[in-house]
Structure formats: structure tokens, C-alpha cells
Amino acid sequence: MKTKFEPRKLMELAIEVMGQSVPEPRDDGKASPKVGAVLLKPEGTVETACRGELRQGDHAEFTLLERKNRGNKLDGSVLFATLEPCAPGARNERKIDCAERIVLARIKEVWVGIQDPDPKVARKGIEHMKNHGIDVHMFDRDLQEIIEKENKEFLVQAMDRARADKGKKTKKVILSTFENTFAIAVTDDFSEEALTQYQTVAGLKEKVGSVAFNHRLVQQGFLTQKQGQFIPTGFGMLLFGKEPRTVMPQAGLLATIHYPDGTEELRDFDEPLVLIPEAVEKWLGDKLPNIIDRSSMRRKETPPLPFEMIREALVNALIHRDYAIREGKCQLVVTVDTIVVKSPGGPIPPITLKQLQSFDAPMLSRNPELHYVFARMDMAEERGFGLRSLKNRAVQLALPLPKYTWKEPYLELTLFRTPEAIAHDLPEAVLSELNEDERPAWQFVATKESITSRELMSNLGLDERKAQRILKKLIGVNLIRRVGGGPATRYEVIRS
């Protein structure tokens, strides 16, 4: 019999228990993580544990599974943990890692609060559990932010330690073949410009090209060392290679501007990954704000979309794309109405397309190593708030909210450049069904996630009868859906 439960309540309980964590007394000032774990057993009973509850330094999962339930049958249980369980090879000591304990306990489902902060081990605990048939989910976005806030000091220190790691950790869980040595490459294939920019912006003390600097790149997973030689990894070549696409055709970015007069401008960005955002910004330059509509006698200039929105979308695509898809390349397509960024690969499991479309997806990185470097270079939000910033900036500018769609093999993000663009983006069959009242109404509704009839009436100066007619029409052409009933009725925008 399947145990019924409310995930949200157990997530909240795990966070409550997290607050009871016992810090280890240390002379070195190292902060201890606050971690809470909740175990739901098949018969419906619930047990909890926090870090250090029974013995200083003990992980919450160890306390819960080994100390409180040693010898108990836990088959089919559900576990909630506020921090990603450590993966094989993530601990220096010869101890069984938490992810393996969970597998051995035959737990069927795990809900994870946040990723491990170390980019070399992030998502590997999650992947290990998934590889052993465990159904893994992430905590709700707002609860992740609570965990981040409560662990702020630990997370900052953990990232500092990751930068200065001595490289002792093994990699028994491989998320990507790009973590491995790239046998046909040598360090001379790295771009000095790219390395210098990383060193300067990230504030690294070691001199580019020095043994100390190369050791840092080894520690961060961008070089390997064999028989005294430094050899690039796949991720190293992607980030810093002079011409990554000569050895990895899926690297880089293809960009196209479609002008209103039917002409096109093309540009292939074959630079190291870390140089592409700046190169794109320079290339677009004065092109982006001034794509002139020559379809009418009067010159009409499209107002500029802040480049930080384009950069956010572009960097997300470069970081989170699936580089195993060799036939797919990141693409940037600019028109008068929209900017579309295409990224090969679907949402990162367990993230769903619906969560992305709501701009409330939990924080999770497909390629933590890439994310780490872009964050150090101030081009990405390390803790994952960039997705929300896209929505908030669109709201500030009274623009339609960005739209995620899946068109295999691409995850596409559409940014709308003008309020009118959302109507132009509609299929002709749908657009032709909307009259002169319904088009501006859709233009307004598209700037929201959902709306009430009263909000529509207030903002567009409509009476109730007209507002209801317009809403009925928008439902009929599958642009919105009705949610709830009575006074609580709302109309939710469909963004698929």
C-alpha cells in the first residue's frame, strides 16, 4: 500500500529540524552546515535527525539511518534532507557516504534541499541515488532559499575551500565525460586571454601559466596531471580552449539577426566559453536597440532590451546545456519582436518544464564546474536566482514574461522585446480570431502569471460584461485557463 503524504509539510519539518543542528567546536573558524533529515516510513511514522544530534560532526542522514534505525527494515521509505547527501568519493575519510547508505537502506524516494556547494561533487550524490533506482526530487524554490540563508556562512566557506582544495577527492560518480582527460589536447590549446580574464575577474593570486595556477585548474577539474604533464579535460577545453569547436563541434554559439527587410546577419562564436558573452555583447552593440522596421513609411525603432537579460539567458544556456548532444549547438536568434536562446537538452531532472515556465524551478546545475567559473567571473548567479531576475526585469519593463518551450532537442527561451511582441508571436490562426479589444487584453495578461477579472477591468477600463467576454475568448483560443471558482477565480496564462 502506497503511503500518502504531503511533501511540502515534510520539507518544512526538515527545515525546522535543520535549525536544531549542533555545530562542532573548532579553533579554525570553520562553519558547520545546518542539516535536517526526515524519514517517512511505509506505515506512516515519521522520524527526524539533525547534524550533530547524537555525536559531534555526524551527518543527519547517518544519525537517522544508522544510529536511530540500525537493523530496522526501511524498504520503501521516503527521505527528506536539506543538503544533498554526500556521494561516493566525496569524503576524505574511509567512511560509507550518505548516498550509499540511502541506497543500501532501500529507500525508494528522496527529496533534496540544495546541491552540495562544492562544484566537483555537486549533483553527484543525486546522480548516485538516481542510478540506483531512487526517485529524486528537489525542495520547493522558496524553501531552498531558506536553507541557503541559514547556511550562508558555511556555503561561502565551502566555495572558498573548493577553490583551494588539495585535489584529494576521487570521482567515483561521473556526471559527464567532459570531466575526463581530453587526450588530444595540450595546455598550449588554452587561450591565454581566457585564462587571464578568469584569473583577473575571479581574483586568483597565482600567475597564469605557473605550476601553482595549473594545479588550481587541476583542483577545479579543468586539467589533469599525468607523469608530470598537465592535460586539459573536456570542461577545460570548453571554458578556455582557443578554438573549442575544432575538437568539439557542439561547442560555441551560432547567432542570427533577422532584419525586417528580409536580410540576415550571421555570426559563429567559436571563442572559449568564458569569452562568448562579452563577444556577443560587442557584436550586437548598436544593432540590438536599432533594428529599424522598414515595412512602413515611418521609421520605427524597437526600444532596447537590457543586455543583462540577454546575458542571463545566454549564460544559462551555455552552462546548463547537454554537451553530450553533439549535433546540437547553442543558438541566439534576434528579430524585431523577440530574442530566442536555444539550448540543447531538456530541463535537468528532476526539474520540469512546467517549473521553468513558472520561473519557480528549484536550483540545480547540470554542469556545476562550468557554473562555478561563470559565477566567479560575475556572469552567473551562483545560487540560481538568475531565472527569477528574468521575470522580475520583464515585469519592471512592462514586457510580456519570457517563455520556455521544448522543441526537441532544444530548450528554447523567448524574450519579448516590446509589449506588442506577444501578439505577433501568436500563430496566425489564433491571432486572426482576436479582435481589437482582445489583442491589447492579451498583451496585458501576458505580462502576468495569472490575473483576475477585476484586475483586467481596472487596468484596461472595461466593464464586467466586456471583461468576461474577453476572458472567455482567451480561454477559447487556449491562451489562458480558469483556476478556482467564485470570488477566488483566477485566469492563469498558458506558456507551453
Image (cartoon, rainbow, N blue to C red):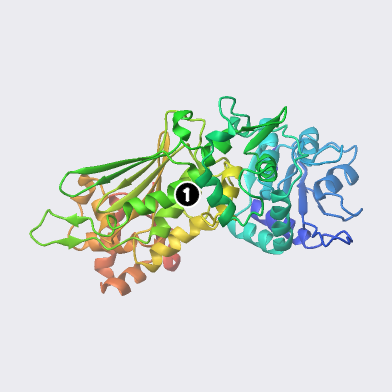
Estimate the x, y position of residue 425 in percent, counting from the top left: 27, 50
Q: Is residue 489 above or below residue 199?
A: below
Residue that label 1 marks: 315
Badge 1: few (under 14), some or many (20 or more) residues near its Cα, within 10 Å? Answer: many
Q: Quick check: 251 left or right of 69?
A: left
Pick the residue in front: 88 or 355.
Answer: 88
Question: What is the x, y in percent for residue 291?
Answer: 23, 55
The residue depicted at 66 percent of the width and 36 percent of the height is 127
- Of the pair 318 and 55, the residue shown nearer to us: 318
Residue located at (78% from left, 43% from top): 43
Residue 269 figure quarter: top left
- The amino acid pointed to by label 1 is Val
Decide which of 472, 165 is in the foreground and name it. Answer: 165
Taking the spot 60% from the left edge, 60% from the top edge, the residue there is: 142
**x and y percent of residue 70 in the render?**
90, 40
Residue 425 in sight from this viewpoint: yes
Name the image quarter holding residue 100. Answer: top right
Residue drawn at point x = 40 percent, y = 65 percent? 395
Residue 64 as seen in the image, left or right of residue 5: right
Give the residue furthest to the top: 184
Q: Can residue 133 be seen by looking at this rendering?
A: no
User: Secondary structure beneath disc 1?
Assistant: helix
Residue 451 in percent (x, y) is at 39, 64
Residue 468 lies, with reference to residue 366, above or below; the image says below
In the picture as drawn, the residue positioned furthest to the left comes out as 297
**Position of residue 389 in the picture relative to residue 263 (left or right):** right
Judge whether 103 appears above or below 312 on screen.
above
- If the image is split into quadrants, where does the N terminus sit? top right
